[in-house]
């Protein structure tokens, strides 16, 4: 799982990454990524709206996104801030597909930054 230092927790940080960051749209999620000029460990945030499903489904999708992010965190450069917004199809996506999409979009955005 992700350590507390690897999570985006404030609403202002979420807004900054979503508004100013680069975006990549996938089948199951939208990935936003921004480089923090101060460096630090890579941080992640997760947005799973009610359109994805009920609370049980939303929490399952969030846990899957967190697990996928924890796998790729060591490969990202310092200061990378990433927010994943789940889309409704993520509720039915298998973990392998969701993890592959997260990895693909995160790595492509990291190369472009």
Image (tube, rainbow, N blue to C red):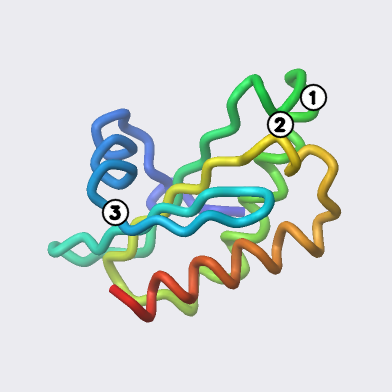
Task: Give neighbour class at mark 1: few <14, some 14-19, many 20+ (Cα, 10 Å).
Answer: few
Residue beneath disc 3: 21
Residue drawn at (65%, 60%) of the image: 68
Mark whose residue sits in front, 3 or 2: 3
The quarter in which the N terminus is drawn is bottom right
Element at label 2: helix
Residue 46 percent coordinates (x, y): 52, 41
Residue beneath disc 2: 59
Residue 39 percent coordinates (x, y): 20, 66
Disc 1 versus disc 3: distance between alpha carbons?
29 Å
Disc 2 versus disc 1: distance between alpha carbons?
5 Å
Q: Which of 112 and 8 is in front in this view?
A: 112
Residue with the most extreme left position: 38
Asked if marks 1 and 3 touch (Cβ < 8 Å), the reply is no
In terms of sequence position, does the residue under pointer 3 or pointer 2 come before the other? 3
Disc 3 versus disc 2: distance between alpha carbons?
25 Å
Question: Left or right: where does residue 47 sit relative to residue 19?
Answer: right
Residue 7 percent coordinates (x, y): 43, 47
């Amino acid at each position: 799982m992700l350590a507390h230092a690897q999570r985006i927790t404030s609403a202002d940080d979420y807004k900054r990454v979503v508004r100013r960051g680069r975006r990549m749209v996938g089948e199951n999620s939208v990935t936003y990524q921004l480089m923090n000029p101060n460096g630090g460990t890579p941080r992640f945030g997760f947005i799973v709206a009610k359109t994805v499903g009920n609370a049980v489904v939303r929490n399952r999708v969030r846990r899957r996104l967190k697990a996928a992010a924890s796998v790729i965190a060591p490969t990202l450069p310092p200061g990378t801030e990433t927010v994943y917004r789940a889309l409704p199809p993520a509720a039915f996506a298998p973990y392998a597909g969701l993890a592959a999409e997260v990895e693909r979009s995160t790595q492509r955005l990291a190369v472009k930054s």
